[in-house]
Image: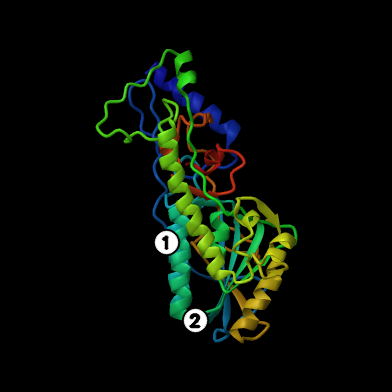
Amino acid sequence: MGSNRLGILALIIFLGQGCAQIPDPIKLQVDGDFAGKIAPTEPQEPVSPSLLPHHRSNPKDCLVAVIDVDGLLLDADSTGLGSLGENSVSLFRERLDAIESNPRVRAVVLRIHSPGGSVTATDIMWHDLQNFRRRTQVPVVACLMDLATGGAYYLATGSDLILAQPTGVTGAIGCILNVYNLQDLMAQFNIAGIPVKAGKNIDLGTPIKALDPEGRKLLQAMADEFHHRFRAVVVRSRPRVDSHLETTFDGRVFTALQARDLGLIDEIGYLDDAVARARSMAGISSSAEIVFYRRQGDPALSPYSVSPNIPLQDKLLPVNVPGLNRSRLPSFLYLWEMDPTVEAITGK
């Protein structure tokens, strides 16, 4: 019992130092000396339309829906202590479905601030957006904020028009898979991997040994295939892009001005400009109000309001060593990733 009390006391001290706000309730299961288990994010109410305050709206007026796309885009729930995030893919689809059921919404603005995400997650979101546009004929304007790279830009290509903030960063048309070799590190602690396997390449990319040339070739072929898909999507949706200019597709990022010159975006402007363009494309009044689709208790107080998508902490100890948590990482990524431990801030 004494060790249990000490463990709980240590947890309380750690939380008091590291977390500004703790959701209620926190569910811990104590077993033996001390073992903590954080309950997944509780199911929530469906998203519902929410108008901005300080604006008067006629119940019959047309609306422009703003969808915020933020954080690392993964087809997985963000769980953990203090988690505020949701499954990016699921939430995006839910919002599109809710907008489609509201005949007052005549235009959509995607407000994107994300470094990208997994190949599959961003491709699903792009596919859902394409189907939404085809079914509804509602114009969609992508507004790229501070950062809209990798899979976030992939998603933006599914819109009718792309507008970027003057100081925004976009591009990163490439694919990456994080593979680490921790063999020497493990040897320092007298740890040796002894896999029992059937199938030569079943552990391809494992961090417990170096990647041999044959294995690297196999993984490289997969990355090249996904990169080719990204490139084809850009060329097909952006007719001004020079498909033969290799520097556009080598994974580098661009300023808004550079991206416009390359044909990656259409215009440079601010969020208000994106909303105005959406109204114009839909042929509705320049005074048409903005509507958000949010959860209960998550009001939008301005056009820049964001639904949180970053957990406060996903583990009891804030320690992250690249490769040790490899099983928790996504697979191939459309992501501008300067720091391979970025998953630590997303609970993944």
x, y percent for residue 50: 55, 70
* Residue 183 shows in the view: yes
Q: Which one is nearer the viewer's eye here, 173 or 26?
A: 173
Identify the residue at the far left of this view.
Answer: 198
Quadrant hosting residue 277: bottom right
Query: Which secondary structure, mark 2?
Result: loop
The crowding category of the residue bearing disc 2, from other C-alpha atoms within 10 Å (few below 14, some 14 to 19, many at least 20), is few
Q: Quadrant of the N terminus?
A: top left
x, y percent for residue 171: 63, 56
Quadrant hosting residue 106: bottom right
Query: Which secondary structure, mark 1?
Result: loop
Residue at the disc numbered 2: 137
The crowding category of the residue bearing disc 1, from other C-alpha atoms within 10 Å (few below 14, some 14 to 19, many at least 20), is few
x, y percent for residue 139: 56, 78
User: Residue at the location (49% across, 48% down)?
Assistant: 333
x, y percent for residue 269: 73, 68
User: Residue at the location (59% across, 44% down)?
Assistant: 337
Amino acid at pointer 2: Gln
Q: Which one is nearer the viewer's eye here, 298 or 195?
A: 195
User: Residue at the location (45% across, 40% down)?
Assistant: 329
* Residue 87 shows in the view: no
Q: Which one is nearer the viewer's eye here, 162 or 79?
A: 162
What colour scheme does the image use? rainbow
Q: Nearer the viewer, mark 1 or mark 2?
A: 2
User: Residue at the location (72% across, 67% down)?
Assistant: 268
Residue 99 numbered mark, or none: none
Q: Is residue 197 above or below residue 81?
A: above
Of callouts 1 and 2, the N-terminal one: 1
Could you give the CA–CA distance between mark 1 and mark 2, rounded to whole angstroms? 28 Å
Residue at the disc numbered 1: 45
Amino acid at pointer 1: Glu
